[in-house]
Amino acid sequence: MGEFDLIARYFTRPVRRAALGVGDDCALLRVAPGMQLAVSSDMLVAGRHFFDDVDPVHLGHKSLAVNLSDLAACGAKPLAFTLALSLPEANEVWLKGFAEGLLALADAHEIELVGGDTTHGPLNICITVFGEVPSGKALLRSGARPGDDIWVSGTLGDARLALDALLGKIDLPPDALSAARLRLECPTPRVALGTALRGIASSALDVSDGLLGDLSHILEQSQVGADIDADAALQTMAARKSTLILPDAQWYQCALAGGDDYELAFTAPADRRDQVLAAASETRTPVTRIGHVTAAPGIRVLDAQGNTLPQQKWSSFDHFA
């Protein structure tokens, strides 16, 4: 099977909203009047972002999900995406599963595959997504203000729990590992919540490298600080509600600095709590208030009694650290 046969068989689909899709040198996208184009790229590299035994259906899903999560953090509606794929071989079983997972999520969010590239080499997946957002309405990292609430969607830390287990750092019962691994390999992009938060949230980003490290980007760009309720963050973990017993330090590490959650962390004025909860209810997305923005710079992590926890190495993931 040659390169163009591969593309035609697994990745060519009729476009509905784009002016022109796969088959020419460029795709052509229509953006409605009064809208801005939101663009983001993410790369997944074998041995760095996923294990060799990952289900290709899950890998296809995650490859697009991490990009849709960026659009969600901006409050953008997905339009289209491109796929650049480096493959060690044209394995039809793998390609069928990968395309199935990728395109099922694309269909769920009505986003079109409109082009890309394929080449022979180490397994590497790069997706670029395009979305649209009303002019001046995008959620940014620079809008947090002292007194704002800090919220997170969904659950934190379960993906990190799976990663530590798969790396042999901890032992998990099979059922706990299976549930946690699903969070690692099949994250849920919070696109509906992101668009619902336009005009409500003052800032937002997606949690990809760990809550505290990612949140620091909002704080730096907004020139503010934060007090974080560590136990509130901890209680979002699905695994925390099980009978699993781990040291407190392990729980905190997963929830506060785990990475691969692809949830939204966002701020909103305290007088908009009802609006935040309404947006969460309308989009069927759980949200948890985990702290507030302060005028003083830096992050304080507090226990349930309001005491500052000793500083730990709760740093986010960094590819070059």
Image (cartoon, grey):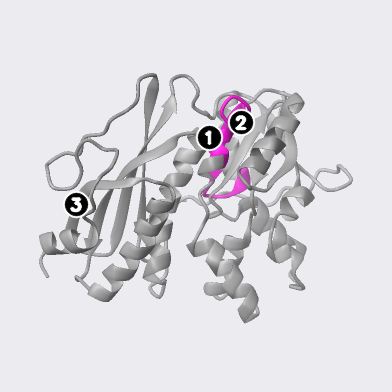
Q: Looking at the image, is 255 positioned above or below residue 16?
A: below
Question: Where is mark 3, residue-wise?
Answer: 117
Task: Give the numbered dot on residue 219.
Answer: 2
> Which is more foreground, mark 2 or mark 3?
3
- Residue 198: x %, y % from top left: 56, 28
Q: Looking at the image, is 220 positioned above or below residue 171?
A: above
Residue type at numbered disc 3: Asp
Question: Where is mark 1, residue-wise?
Answer: 195
Q: Distance between the residues labelled 2 and 3?
A: 37 Å
- Name the quadrant containing residue 146: top right
> Residue at left 69%, top 51%?
312
Q: How far apart are marks 1 and 3 (CA)?
A: 30 Å
Q: In which quarter of the image is the N terminus?
A: bottom left
- Name the quadrant containing residue 21: top left
In this orientation, does residue 207 appear? yes
Residue type at numbered disc 1: Thr
Magenta run includes residue 203: yes
Q: Are marks 2 and 3 in contact (CB under 8 Å)?
A: no
Which region of the structure is painted magenta? 193-212
Magenta run includes residue 281: no
Say whether disc 1 or disc 3 marks the residue closer to the N-terminus: 3
Q: What element carries label 2?
A: helix
Q: Do the residues labelled 1 and 2 touch (CB within 8 Å)?
A: no
> Circle 1: is it few (<14), some (14-19), or many (20+) Cα within 10 Å?
many
Say whether disc 1 or disc 2 marks the residue closer to the N-terminus: 1
- Residue 293: x %, y % from top left: 71, 30
Q: Is mark 1 on a helix, strand or loop?
A: helix
Q: Looking at the image, is 24 positioned above or below residue 223?
A: below
In this orientation, does residue 170 appear? no
Q: Do the residues labelled 1 and 3 touch (CB within 8 Å)?
A: no
